[in-house]
C-alpha cells in the first residue's frame, strides 16, 4: 500500500515536471529571444525535446493505469480518482496535442507560431490534470483550514466586543485600576490566541518541510556543485590559515584604510551614529512601515522563528493590537491618564478590525478554491458517467434487435448490462453525496437524484432481460440529463474564471459565502427538470393502452414521476425563499 501511495506521489511529481517543461522549453528556445543562454551546455533541438516530453507523458499514463489497478481493492476511492484522471487525459487528447507539436517542430520549416498556440492549450490541459489529481487531498485541506480560520475569526470578534466595552468604560471615567484590570483580561485573551496561531503556523511549516522531496534540498545549487568534493588543501577547523602580513599590518599602505573600512573614530558604513537610528529603522515616535521589523524584533515574529515561516493572515495585526493594549494598561496603572489610554485602545480596536478583514478575505479565497475543485471533480465524474452510459445504450439497442426469442443467452447479456449500469449508479451516488454535503445548491442535487432514479429503473429492467422501448427511453433520458449537467458545470467553471478579476476588485466589506452555482443556473436546471417531467409524462402516455396504466413497470414510472414533481415544487420554493443560503 505504501508503495502505491509513493508511486501516486511520484506520478504527481512527473506531471508537474512535464507541465514545467512544457511551459519553459519553448520560451528558452523561442526565436524571438536572441540573447545567448547563460549555461554553456548545448540546447537540444526543439523537436527532440518535445519527443522526450511525449515519451515521458506516455509512460506517465501507463503508470497511472497500473497504479489505479493496484489500488482498486485497497483504496477504491483513490483508484477511481486515478482512472478519472486517465479518462480526462484521453478526453483532452494530451498525447495527440504533443504529437501535433512535435510534427510542427520537426518540419524543415518549423511553424513556431502554431506551436506556441498549441503549447498554450497543452499547458492548460496539463494544469487541468494536475488539479484533478490534487483535488482529493486539497479539498480536505481546505475544509480543515476553513474551520481553523473560522475559529480564529470567532475569537477575534469576541475580542473586538470586549475591547470596545473596555474603551467605553475608560471614556466614561470609570476607576483606572478597574479599567486596567479589564484591559489585562482582553490582553491575556489576545496573547493566548497569538500563541495558538504561532503553534499552528509552526505545525504547518513542519508538515510542509516533511512533505518536501529530498531532491529539493540541493535544487538551488548548480549541476555538479552538490557532489563536488571538498578541497583537500583547505584548512581544517582549528587550523590557522596563513595570512599576508601586509593585510594584518594597519600601518601598511601609508596608514590609509582599505575601501569600505572606516577611519579611526568614525562609525563604519551602515552603522548608526550616536543617538541616531540606523538606516531603514523608524525614528522615535514614528510607526515602522509595513514589512519592516520593529527595533529588537525579527521580521518574522519572535526570536528564533524561521524567517520564511508562513504566517496566518492577521497575526501581525493581533500582535500590534496586544502591544497597544499593554500601553493602555501602563497608562491606566502608572499615569492614570485616561485620554492616552483611550487612544491606545482605539488603535487596538483598529488593528483587531484589520485582522478581522484579512481573516474574512482568506475565507473567501478558500471558498473560491474549494468551489473550483468541486466543480472540476464533478465535471470529470459526470463525463465518466456519460461515456459509460453511452456504451450501455449502444449495447441495449443491439440486445433489443436480437431479442425476438427470450433465450437464456439474451437474458445473460441483459444481466451483464445491468451490472454495468450498477457501476454508473455508484458514480451517481458519489456525485450526489458531494452535492448534498456542499449544501448550497438546490436544483443540481435534485437533477442528480432524478438521474439516480432512472438509472435504478434501468438496472431492474436490464436484469430481467428487457431492452425495449421503456428501457431505451430511460437510458436516453439519463444521457440527456448527464450531458446537460456537464454543460452546466462547464459554464460555471468558465463563469468563475471570468469573475475572478471582478471579485478581486470588489473585496470591500464582509465577503459573502457564495454558493457552488449561482441562482440563474439553479433556475435553468429547475426548468430543465420540469420539461423532462412533462416529456416523460407524454412518452409514458403513448405507451399506455386505455385511460390507465396496467403494466407494473409503467405504473411504477408514473409513481416515480409524481414524487419527482413534488420535489421540484419543494426545490423551487426553497430557492425562492433562500432556504439554501
Image (cartoon, helix red, strand yellow):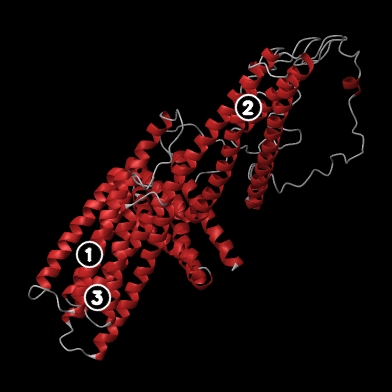
Whether the residues at callouts 1 and 3 have beta carbons within 8 Å, the answer is: no
Q: Which of the two discs, 3 and 2, sits closer to the camera? A: 2
Residue 403 picture location, percent across and down? 18, 84
Q: Residues within 10 Å of mark 2 (few under 14, many from 20)?
A: many
Residue 546 picture location, percent across and down? 7, 75
Disc 3 target residue: 395
Q: Is residue 366 left or right of residue 158?
A: left
Residue 158 picture location, percent across and down? 59, 34
Query: Could you tell me which quadrant the C terminus lies in?
Result: top left
Whether the residues at callouts 1 and 2 have beta carbons within 8 Å, the answer is: no
Query: Could you tell me which quadrant the N terminus lies in?
Result: bottom right
Disc 3 versus disc 2: distance between alpha carbons? 71 Å
Q: Which is more N-terminal, label 2 or label 1?
A: 2
Residue positioned 63% across, 17% down in the render: 172
Disc 2 target residue: 163
Q: Which is more N-terminal, label 3 or label 1?
A: 3
Amino acid at each position: 500500500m505504501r508503495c502505491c501511495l509513493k508511486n501516486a506521489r511520484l506520478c504527481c511529481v512527473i506531471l508537474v515536471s512535464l507541465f514545467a517543461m512544457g511551459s519553459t522549453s519553448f520560451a528558452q528556445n523561442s526565436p524571438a529571444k536572441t540573447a545567448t543562454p547563460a549555461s554553456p551546455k548545448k540546447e537540444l533541438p526543439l523537436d527532440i525535446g518535445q519527443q522526450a516530453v511525449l515519451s515521458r507523458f506516455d509512460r506517465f499514463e501507463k503508470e497511472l493505469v497500473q497504479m489505479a489497478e493496484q489500488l482498486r481493492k485497497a483504496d477504491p476511492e483513490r483508484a477511481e480518482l486515478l482512472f478519472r484522471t486517465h479518462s480526462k487525459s484521453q478526453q483532452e487528447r494530451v498525447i495527440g496535442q504533443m504529437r501535433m507539436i512535435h510534427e510542427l517542430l520537426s518540419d524543415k520549416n518549423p511553424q513556431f507560431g502554431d506551436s506556441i498556440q498549441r503549447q498554450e492549450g497543452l499547458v492548460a490541459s496539463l494544469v487541468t490534470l494536475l488539479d484533478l489529481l490534487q483535488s482529493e487531498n486539497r479539498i480536505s485541506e481546505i475544509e480543515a483550514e476553513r474551520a481553523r480560520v473560522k475559529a480564529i475569526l470567532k475569537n477575534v470578534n469576541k475580542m473586538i466586543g470586549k475591547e470596545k466595552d473596555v474603551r467605553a468604560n475608560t471614556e466614561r471615567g470609570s476607576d483606572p485600576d478597574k479599567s486596567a484590570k479589564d484591559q489585562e483580561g482582553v490582553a491575556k485573551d489576545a496573547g493566548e490566541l497569538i500563541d495558538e496561531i504561532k503553534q499552528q503556523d509552526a505545525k504547518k511549516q513542519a508538515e510542509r518541510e516533511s512533505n518536501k522531496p529530498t531532491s529539493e534540498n540541493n535544487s538551488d545549487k548548480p549541476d555538479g556543485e552538490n557532489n563536488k568534493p571538498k578541497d583537500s588543501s583547505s584548512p581544517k577547523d582549528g587550523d590557522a590559515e596563513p595570512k599576508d602580513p601586509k593585510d594584518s599590518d594597519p600601518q601598511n599602505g601609508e596608514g590609509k584604510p582599505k575601501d569600505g573600512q572606516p577611519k579611526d573614530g568614525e562609525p563604519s558604513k551602515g552603522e548608526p551614529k550616536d543617538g541616531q537610528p540606523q538606516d531603514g529603522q523608524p525614528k522615535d515616535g514614528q510607526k515602522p512601515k509595513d514589512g519592516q521589523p520593529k527595533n529588537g524584533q525579527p521580521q518574522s515574529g519572535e526570536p528564533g522563528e524561521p524567517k520564511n515561516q508562513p504566517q496566518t493572515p492577521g497575526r501581525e495585526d493581533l500582535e500590534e493590537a496586544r502591544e497597544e493594549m499593554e500601553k493602555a494598561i501602563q497608562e491606566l496603572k502608572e499615569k492614570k491618564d485616561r485620554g492616552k489610554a483611550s487612544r491606545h485602545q482605539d488603535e487596538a480596536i483598529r488593528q483587531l478590525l484589520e485582522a478581522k478583514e484579512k481573516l474574512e478575505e482568506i475565507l473567501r479565497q478558500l471558498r473560491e478554491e474549494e468551489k473550483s475543485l468541486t466543480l472540476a471533480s464533478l465535471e470529470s465524474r459526470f463525463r465518466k458517467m456519460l461515456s459509460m452510459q453511452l456504451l450501455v445504450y449502444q449495447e441495449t439497442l443491439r440486445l433489443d434487435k436480437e431479442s425476438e426469442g427470450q433465450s437464456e443467452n439474451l437474458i445473460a447479456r441483459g444481466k451483464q448490462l445491468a451490472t454495468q449500469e450498477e457501476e454508473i449508479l455508484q458514480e451517481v451516488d458519489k456525485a450526489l453525496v458531494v452535492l448534498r454535503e456542499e449544501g448550497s445548491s438546490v436544483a443540481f442535487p435534485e437533477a442528480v437524484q432524478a438521474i439516480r432514479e432512472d438509472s435504478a429503473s434501468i438496472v431492474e429492467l436490464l436484469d430481467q432481460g428487457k431492452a425495449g422501448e421503456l428501457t431505451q427511453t430511460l437510458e436516453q433520458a439519463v444521457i440527456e440529463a448527464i450531458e446537460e449537467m456537464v454543460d452546466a458545470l462547464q459554464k460555471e467553471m468558465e463563469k468563475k474564471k471570468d469573475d475572478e478579476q471582478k471579485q478581486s476588485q470588489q473585496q470591500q466589506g464582509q465577503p459573502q459565502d457564495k454558493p457552488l452555482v449561482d441562482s440563474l443556473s439553479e433556475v435553468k436546471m429547475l426548468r430543465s427538470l420540469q420539461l423532462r417531467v412533462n416529456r416523460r409524462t407524454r412518452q409514458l402516455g403513448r405507451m399506455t393502452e386505455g385511460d390507465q396504466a396496467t403494466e407494473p413497470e409503467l405504473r411504477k414510472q408514473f409513481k416515480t414521476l409524481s414524487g419527482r414533481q413534488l420535489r421540484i415544487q419543494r426545490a423551487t420554493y426553497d430557492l425562492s425563499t433562500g432556504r439554501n443560503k
